[in-house]
Amino acid sequence: MKNLLIFGIIFTLSACTPIVKKNPNQTIQVTQQDNNNYLIVDKKHKELLSKGKELVGKGAKKDAIIHYFNPVIKDYEKIYTNSSKRIYTARTQTEHDFYSMTATNEGKVAHILSDNWSRAYFLKAYALLELKELNLAEKNIRKALHLAPSNSKYLSELGHIQHLTKDWKKSLQSYKLAEKSANFFSPKRLKKQEILRAKRGIGFSYTELKEFNKAEATYKEILKIDSKDKIALRELKYIRGLKR
């Protein structure tokens, strides 16, 4: 989780930190054939994850894990577990560039994939949560975050697991990172949704920590984004009732 903790510092410094050019020995050579093979396998994995997600929706969580999520994870782990490069997955070019810069500043070479590998861990974690396997779910979401430490969706899912274990301080930290990550890195079509999810988690964490003024302020921020947000309206009513 080191990258989660230093994420804000690195991003702040990125504007004034020179990007170190890789020497020729650091360049990852990819032929057209390699690229075509990767795209074919990547498409297959995406299809498997979609089918697995459908199964989870139908209640067949164990089948989804065994027949869809685990095979995708196994494929990637077989190829990349012993890689000397720092493997990341990214959803946007901004996230891609950030990971590349982070690896360079750490003296490493980044190899950045689509988000299929990390999404397999995320979907497996979600299915495990449905099966009430909190420890295994957290283990898998942390694996997703190792690959994509600035993915807002994964950070919020970690915050949710920490809510379930009543670790309010850690959940607050996770949701705050999720909000920052959503602002900087989330895909445009998902940005609002992921910001709102993170903010709801922040508000709920503050409420459980009995920091009601901060919780109230957070829910008001949500209503500035979406004046009809049902959760924010409900929680504000609850907090105001406590203050009477």
Image (cartoon, rainbow, N blue to C red):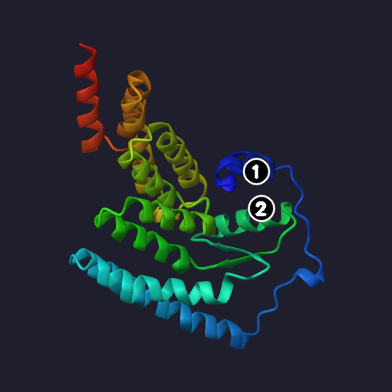
Q: Are marks 2 and 1 in contact (CB under 8 Å)?
A: yes
Q: Identify the mark at residue 10; answer none if there is no mark.
A: 1
Please tell me whether mark 2 sits on a helix, a strand or a loop.
Answer: helix
Q: Position of residue 218 (x, y in %)?
A: 36, 28
Residue located at (36% from left, 55% from top): 137
Tell me the amino acid under the disc marked 2. Answer: Thr
- Tell me the SS state at disc 1: helix
Whether residue 228 is visible to the viewer of this picture, yes or no, is no
Instruction: Tell me the crowding category of disc 2: few under 14, some 14 to 19, or many 20 or more residues within 10 angstroms, Cα based.
Output: many
Q: Position of residue 153 (x, y in %)?
A: 40, 51
> Mark 2 or 1 closer to N-term?
1
Residue 171 % position (x, y):
40, 37
Query: Within 10 Å of the Cα at label 1, are there few (<14), some (14-19), or many (20+) other Cα atoms?
Result: some
**Is residue 130 shown left or right of residue 112?**
left
- Rendered residue at 48%/77% (across/down): 75
| Real-space Cα separation, disc 2 to disc 1, in angstroms | 7 Å
Tag shown at residue 102? 2
Residue 153 seen by the camera: yes
The answer to whether 75 appears left or right of 56 in the picture is: right
